[in-house]
Image (cartoon, rainbow, N blue to C red):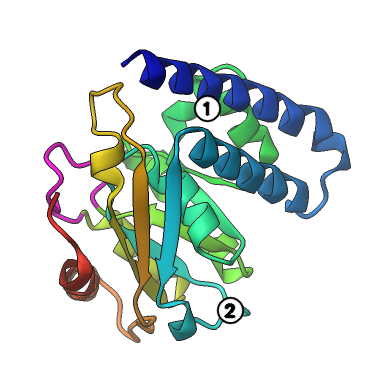
Amino acid sequence: MIISLAKIFIALLLTIVLATLVLLLLPFQRNGNIFHVITRLYSRCVLTVCGVRVVSKGSGHIDFSRNYIYVANHASLFDIPAVLIGIPATISIVYKKELERIPIFGWGMKFGKTYIAIDRHGGQDALQSLEEAANKIRQGVSILLFAEGTRSEDGKLQPFKRGAFSLAVRAGVPIVPVTINGSFHILQKHSLRITPGTITIVLERPIEPPAANGRETELQLRDEVRKRIEQHYIQQ
């Protein structure tokens, strides 16, 4: 546990340093490249410090010159750095707007203007943030969404929420199902114990966006993506 706490302290220190660097470099950022370089550097440093190795499978299924909505399961705080390192593409993360209140870290995400905030409280603000996200995707941005909405409590796949698939239908961009295995064992929810290990990222073939829209289309898309992720998922 002492070693785990030391690793968490180093990871927090890296977060503060690199988030501060993002804020300092904002005047020089034009297309988001600086932000993506720093977040990938951050991810690689955190994974290395914590003894986490990332293995990626299925990259041959993906045309990385296109933009996609990557939809994944979620079991650990290590999922995001693992995806950023394991997928050889520039990916923006969709995050809950409340995170912007966190000093330095949240400010970096908000003012970096590269990641996408979603208001999850419903109402007009939520609809507007969803439409803004869809517009960014149409402009050529690839994004990552966690379909379960939050981390798994027990290492099993949770029900998938509709939001990711509503966004996919709105944007008209293919979905890539992403299965993340091994991260729950490394750091479980509500735990501070980090266990070194390997995270495996499995990329499925893209699912083209349906021509129709509406609730039923979104639910069918959700079920198809969950089925593909479940095929590769190892219960933890």
Q: Residue at x 30, y 76 (%)?
A: 213
* Residue 53 coordinates in the image, percent (x, y): 44, 50
What numbered label is drawn on residue 100?
1
Whether residue 72 is visible: yes
What numbered label is drawn on residue 120?
none
The earlier-in-sequence mark between 2 and 1 is 2
Q: Quadrant of residue 202?
A: bottom left
* Badge 1: residue crowd in 10 Å (few <14, some 14–19, many ≥20): some
On screen, 106 above or below 211? above
Q: Residue at x 58, y 44 (%)?
A: 44
On screen, 218 above or below 181? below
Q: Residue extending furthest right?
A: 28
Viewed as shown, does residue 108 lie left or right of 190?
right
**Marks 2 and 1, Cα distance to the nearest angstrom?**
29 Å
Residue behind mark 2: 66
* Badge 2: residue crowd in 10 Å (few <14, some 14–19, many ≥20): few
Viewed as shown, does residue 173 lie left or right of 225?
right
